[in-house]
Image: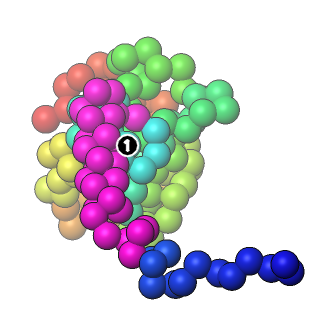
Amino acid sequence: MTRRAHPTPARGRAARDLAPSIGRRAACATLAALALAASGCKRGGARCATCGMAIDPKSTWSATLVVGSERRPFDSPRCALVAWRSRGVAATSLIVHEFYGGDERDARELRFVSGSDVDGPMGHDLVPVAPEKAAKFMADHTGERVLTLDEITADVVQHLP
Ligand SMILES: [Zn+2]
């Protein structure tokens, strides 16, 4: 009358581990795929709001717009800048990865090179480089223009190659 015997481990495991869990996993995968197809947003399986491509969170091309207290991910600086400059997203700042170091930086601290031979996930991109590396990048990658964040207007993003 003191304590109940534990259920035998073999039975407990058999009941939990076989077919039902496989079924559940498959169902989860299906749900995740449906959720992505339906809208695609938020972290983990996020999609770029500009082009719809899946965002690889480990990619140094990924970029984040800060909109109030919200952080919106994009697959590339180009897509983030299209959203900000020509699609009316009221961002206050942009976080990108500096080309050489790969570290995340505020876009205001960097320069963006257009027309280079370095392609992002969407093809031609505005490549973020540290100001002191801009000349080297231009020489190595045949860039066309070096722009500050403020110089990247709606007109600039609409006329990228
Ligand atoms: Zn995109």
33 or 155: nearer the eye? 33
Left or right: residue 115 versus residue 65 is left
Residue at figure coordinates x 31%, y 70% from the top left: 18
| Count of marks overlaid on the render | 1
Q: Position of residue 62 (x, y in %)?
A: 37, 51
Residue at figure coordinates x 49%, y 75% from the top left: 12
Quarter in which the C terminus is drawn: top left
Residue at figure coordinates x 48%, y 31% from the top left: 150
Would you name the residue on which mark 1 appears? 46
Whether 73 is drawn above or below 117: the answer is: above
Q: Main secondary structure of the magenta part?
A: helix
94 or 129: nearer the eye? 94
* Quarter assignment of residue 93: top right
Left or right: residue 140 versus residue 7 is left
Kind of residue sitting beneath label 1: Ala
67 or 19: nearer the eye? 19
Residue 133 in view, yes or no:
no
Range of magenta residues: 14-41
Left or right: residue 142 versus residue 99 is left
Q: Position of residue 45 (x, y in %)?
A: 35, 47
Q: Which residue lies furthest to the top in this view?
A: 88
